[in-house]
Amino acid sequence: MKQYQDHYFKKAKKENYPARSVYKLKEIDNRFHIFENGQRVLDLGAAPGSWTLFSAKKVGPEGYVLGVDIQTTETEFPENVTFLQADVFEDSPELMAAMEKHLPYDLIISDMAPKTIGVRFADQANSLELCERAKELIPRRLKVGGHFIVKIFDSSDVKGYTDSLRKMFGKVKNFKPKSSREESIELFIVALGFRGIEG
C-alpha cells in the first residue's frame, strides 16, 4: 500500500505537480473527456494547485483557469491562470472582479474537502455541506452545456445529492479514481451537460 501511494507522490514531483491529486483529475478526464481547448475553468479548493496546472495545460493558452482557495500556495502558474486566496462562497470585490471577466464557465471543478476530525459521520456531513454550497454556484457561474466535477466523502447522503444534480444535468456518474488511496472514502461526482435552471 505504501509503495502504491509513493508511486503517485514521486510521479507528481517528477512531473512538477505540487500534489498527487492531479492523477485523479487526469483519470476523470480520460474517462469522461471533460476538457477542451479554449475552455474557461473555475477550480474550487485549488491549493496547492495541481488541478489548476493540469486544467491550464488542457485548455491551452486560449483558455482560462480561475483557481480559488482559502489557503495560499507558492506554486507558479502560467499566464492563463489567476489564483486567488479567497472564500469562493463570499462575493468579495476582488473575487467578483476576477470571476466576472470570464463568466459563464465551461467547467467547475472542486477538490474541496473539509478539515477532517477523524469522526467519520461528522467528516461526511461536512463534506456534503461543502458540496451543497458548490452546487449553489452552478446557476450563476456555469454555462448551459457545461460540466461540474465535485469531490464528496462517500455516505448514505450521496444518492440524494446525485439525484439533485440529475435534475440539472444530462448525465451524472460517480467515479473512484485508481489514484485515490484505497482506504479513502472520497469519490468524485461527474455531472455532464448542464441544462440550465427553469424559471
Image (tube, helix red, strand yellow):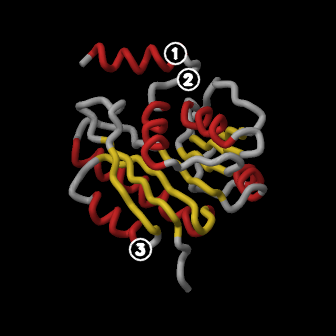
The amino acid on which the numbered mark 2 sits, given as a three-letter code, is Tyr
- Per the image, label 1 sits on a secondary structure element best described as helix
Give the residue pinned by disc 2: 17
The amino acid at mark 1 is Lys
Q: Earlier along the polypeptide chain: callout 3 or callout 2?
A: 2
C-alpha span from label 1 to label 2: 6 Å
Kind of residue sitting beneath label 3: Lys
Quadrant occupied by the N terminus: top left
Cα distance in 3D space between marks 3 and 2 = 35 Å
Q: Earlier in the sequence, mark 3 or mark 1?
A: 1
Res 8 → quadrant: top left
Question: In the rendering, which numbered label is found on residue 167?
Answer: 3
- Disc number placed over residue 13 in the picture, else none: 1
Q: Are marks 3 and 1 in contact (CB under 8 Å)?
A: no
Q: Residue furthest bottom?
A: 199
In this image, 62 relative to 198: left or right?
Answer: right
Label 3, secondary structure: give it: loop
Residue at 78% from the left image edge and 34% from the top image edge: 79
For mark 2, give the secondary structure. Answer: loop
Q: Residue at x 55, y 30 (%)?
A: 48
Q: Is residue 63 above or below residue 105?
A: above
Expressed as whole percent of the image width and height from the top left, the position of residue 64 reads 72, 45
Q: Which residue occupies the foreground of this view, 128 or 77?
A: 77
Picture coordinates of residue 98, whole percent (x, y): 75, 50
Q: Is residue 20 above or below residue 163?
A: above
Circles 1 and 2: CB atoms closer than 8 Å: yes
10 Å crowding of disc 1: few (<14), some (14-19), many (20+): few
Crowding at label 3, few (<14), some or many (≥20) Cα neighbours within 10 Å? some
